[in-house]
Image (tube, coloured by chain):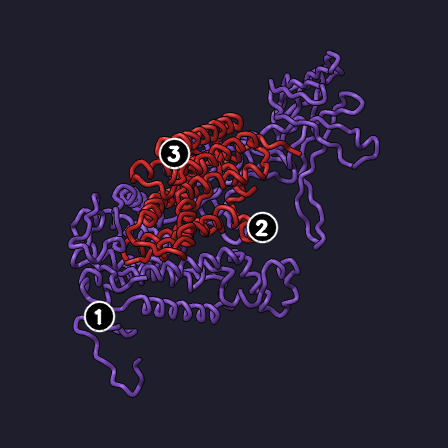
Chain colours: A purple, B red
Amino acid sequence: MVTTDQPVAPPAPGAPQKREIWQMPWGWPEAVLIQGGVLYVTFLLQYLLNRKTPGLIVPFPLNWILPGAIVLIAITLGMVGRRHAFMRWLSGVPFAVTSIVIYTLLGLVGILIVQYSSDQIALALKLYHSAHPEMISELMRQKLPLDGLLDFGLHKLFSSIPFLVATLMIMLNLSAVVGRRLLTTRPGNFGFMLNHVGLLLVMVGMIAGSAQRISGNVYLLPNQSDMHAYKLNDDNKVVATYPLGGTVHLDNFMVDFYPPNLTMIDITGMMTGHGHQAPIIDSEWAEKGRVFEADGLTCRILEYYPSAQPPTNDGADWQPAPVIGTPAPAVKVEVTKPEGMRTTLWVTTSKPELTYQQTPQGGYERVWISRIVPAQLDATHFLALVYREMPQPKAFHASLTLTEPGKTPVTRMLEVNKPARIGDWWLYQSGYDIDRSGELFTIIEASKDPALPVVYTGLICMVLGALVAFWFTPRRSIAAVTPAAETPEEPTQPVEPAAASDVVEEDNAL
Amino acid sequence: MTPNPFHTTGIIILLLWGLAIIGYIPAISRYTRFMLSVIPLLIGWSLLTLNLIDQWQTLGHPPMRTVNQTMMWASFFLPLIMLGIQLFRKTRIHAIPSIVVAAGLLMRPLLKVEVADRMLMPALQSPWFAPHVLIYMLSYGAIAAAALLALTYLIFSLFRKLQADSDIIDVTRILMRIAYPLLTIGMLMGAYWAKLCWGHYWGWDSKETAAFISWTSLLIYTHLDYRTKLSPRWNLGLALLAGMMILFTWVLINYLPSAQGSEHVYAMQ
């Protein structure tokens, strides 16, 4: 046993010396300490700035200059200083994995804590710092705790300084390793570059785009036009107007609804006082030709109209009618009773109405009301058309005429998943709503993102890189190569065979 | 109570796969092993396939909307991955954990009845819907198998030292290396689809963020496995961590308050 009185024996010749922290070459401890320290400082900065800003937006042209400069400088240093110990560390696995871990932890925080939009936080901050903080509504106090977490930007994490800096650290590592490997010509480098350059491009595009991406909505009734998109805040007030550089005219807007359910109800329980809800025996989609049987009754749907108007004479059939706003469907049902008797009847439902109800907090909220109109089959059995909550859209599309200055107007059918374009703007069929007169209007989202080509290029590179990685997977990793082997086992389809200039993290074992 | 349409089929599949597990016990002879393991496995898998096809026809759209349906798809892919590795790598070390995971994934569809909904919201009526979900379920299945394999042998390693070049590490690595590119492609496919549908490719929505950190957990594994001398315990531990992240993204996130406003709410049942 060695004590302090005895001289310490010198290390045996050839034995590895233990590296002190901050002694080159750097490794895991330095990566963790440096990146952890940077993160700590950024949270402090966020705390200091948070009372003044709801979220960090890198303004134009800094949104391009900042990531672009980091990328170019790091790639250049990686190329020029590829054998330097510091660049090897900056482009190495310890730095990479540490930055990925930090990114992952921040993402986890962003999931565990509810994130809010800039508008909500801006309003809360404005009221909080105003002369009358008591004007913050109880609802907002419950939704948005104004102390503690908000001070460090955790409610707006993905627009915060720590998150931006974490992104830049990953970009630094990616750029450095791309620079170091840029002049490498072996085949395995191709997949490597696709993956890393792709991710780099996506990150550059996201930072650049976050400052310049604009989106707003266009609200149109049929035969209406507009040349602008509007950004609304949470109180539905217009806070920004964006010219589209052309005119969007809504020729026609159609919504195709899923049918309601034709439902058989047994009111026996209600009649005998057992329970207050009539139990549903069976239910089937109200489509022509569908059949269901329950309690000895067979119901066959002979006709279904998504929207119908009542007959003018008793005993006549309902007639199909165009849908205006929400549908008022009707079905013709043939019911066969156990004794063989058949009867035919029409089942309808009231047209769902949109109305406003007062909330306990004193505001108003919109609710749908649809009244069931049951059709009696016998003493205890009724049929009714029932929507689960409200009519569910199967598809909705807007027929648009898009006119740009100096160009021929074009007609486009705008549907969900099928956007259209006007100038630099992309138009998306976002949704629809009903105005107070009961008429449907379309909601079109218009957005513009100059960084999109960069992001798409990055996505394509990453997909190709993933495919290359899938096919050219090495058989063994470094850990599986035993020190006793004279030559390492060569992978059959190498992606990144070890090279003298390559970093093999032999002293970074875990 | 609403009857479970999957009840009978599910029980038969579980019984067949239970028999298949017995068939993979090493002491049994080769012929008996084949008859007891591969045959029941394939019969059970065929029944599951038929059930999925039936659902697709009945619903009129891909049965990939709910957690139950996605679990059935992951369970569909896992035997294929397992048999593929068995065939090409000549190892069965992963077989029992893989079958256990595949059977385990069927427990929720068996125990929790979900009413099959023929309605499919317009956002999901896209040619990207099925490929996006299928690629994800393929990768989730592989990661789940790797995670259970890792857990099993981490416990085993308490009693016996693991070698770095053992089949366990090898198969774990293969499963994770299958999963990583698939997860990447699935995620990027989702981003492109989101741009077509919602107008923006990435919104740091809670489900998207969870999918992202699942991907980064595989990124961590891939970097460390390939570029450092990862000890067996670390290798398996990271695979297990990746599996836990997948479980979080797939199921647990649906119960968090932050997910209630998610645009991916259609998957929550």
The label on residue B33 is: 3
Task: Please determine whether, in this image, residue A287 is positioned above or below residue B62.
Answer: above
Three-letter amino acid code at the position of disc 1: Pro
Q: CA gap, disc 2 to disc 3? A: 67 Å
Q: Quadrant of residue B230?
A: bottom left
Query: Quadrant location of the N terminus of chain A?
Result: bottom left
Residue occupying image coordinates x 60% and y 68%: A130
Q: In this view, does B104 lie above or below A25?
A: above
Front residue of B153 and A475: B153
Identify the chain of the residue marked 1, using the numbered disc in the image: A
Residue at point 64%, 16% (across, down): A302
Q: What element carries label 2?
A: loop
Q: Are marks 2 and 1 on the same chain?
A: yes
Q: Which chain carries label 3?
A: B
Residue denoted by label 1: A16
| Mark pair 2, 1: CA separation | 68 Å
**Is circle 3 on the same chain as circle 1?**
no
Do the CB atoms of the residues marked 2 and 1 lie less than 8 Å apart? Answer: no
Q: Mark 2 points at which residue?
A: A236
